[in-house]
Amino acid sequence: MLSRQQQRLASAVRAFSSSSVARGHTSNIGKAPIKFSPAAVSFAPSPTALSVTGPLGTTSVPLEPYMTIDFPTSDTLALSVQNAEEKKQRSMWGLTRTLINNAVVGMTEGFTVPLYLVGVGYRAVLEADPRGTENGGSGMRLSMKVGFSHLVNVPIPAHIKVEVPYATKIVLSCTDKHQLGLFAAKVRKWRPPEPYKGKGIFVGSETIRIKAVKKK
């Protein structure tokens, strides 16, 4: 019979040994396969980049030397790295997989995000830009009333498509998710949502918690 102290020691050893088993590192995002339509998307891998071509154009995603592209089936792309135990390789694995997936979606469907102007008198119109296509512009601009004594004019880059279905809604479209987010942030910064009256330019499903005003 084991004494109570011996039983406790044995239990502690079992718990320690079972929890100290080494587990292999991986990237849950990086190892996820990317599904695509072979009829709509084509790839051209090279040692330093992966070219993605679709109905909306062509883009390129940089690849690190330790990455490998594979096609286990005709409609599946898999990305792997040489040593997932290395933190840098593991983090770049997930990031690159996300960039490739965004490139596939961007070249086939594109990305769209709505902006909402919330506030009394807030409105936007799409008009010709007097500066034309200077500095990579599209020749169009957003003219917005957002609470200032003057109009706010935002030139639209050539790679961004803008629609104004009605005065308080702006719809942005682009094949590059990153560039779309940058332009949406550029428009939003003119009147970020404020927490007292809930006014501002809201991006997508963005919400804000209204603060109670303390009465003296």
Image: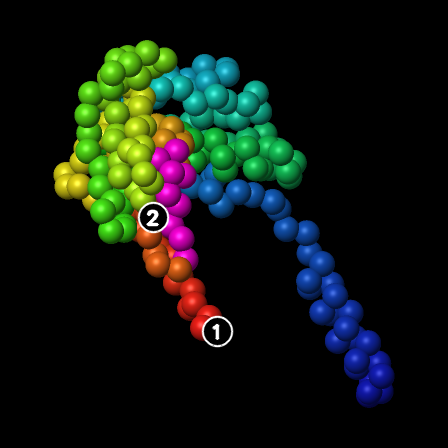
In the visual, does 164 lie left or right of 104?
A: left
Q: Main secondary structure of the magenta part?
A: loop
Give the percent coordinates (x, y) of residue 82.
59, 29
Q: Residues within 10 Å of mark 1 (few under 14, many from 20)?
A: few
Q: Is residue 124 left or right of residue 181?
A: left
**Which residue is painted at 32% across and 28% down in the image?**
154
In the image, residue 4 lies at what x, y percent?
Answer: 82, 87
Q: Nearer the viewer, residue 158 or 211?
A: 211
Is residue 106 at all visible to an observer of this figure? no
What amino acid does circle 2 point to? Gly
Contact (Cβ within 8 Å) of mark 2 with mark 1: no
Report how far apart the C-alphas of labels 2 and 1 lie in the structure: 26 Å
User: In the rendered image of this protein, does residue 50 appear above or below residue 192?
Assistant: above
Q: Nearer the viewer, residue 180 or 186?
A: 186
Tell me which corner region of the image, top left, top right, bottom left or bottom right, holds residue 17. Answer: bottom right
Stretch of the chain drawn in magenta: 186-195
The residue that disc 2 covers is: 200
Q: For mark 2, does the 10 Å Cα neighbourhood hold few (<14), some (14 to 19), or many (20 or more) residues?
A: many
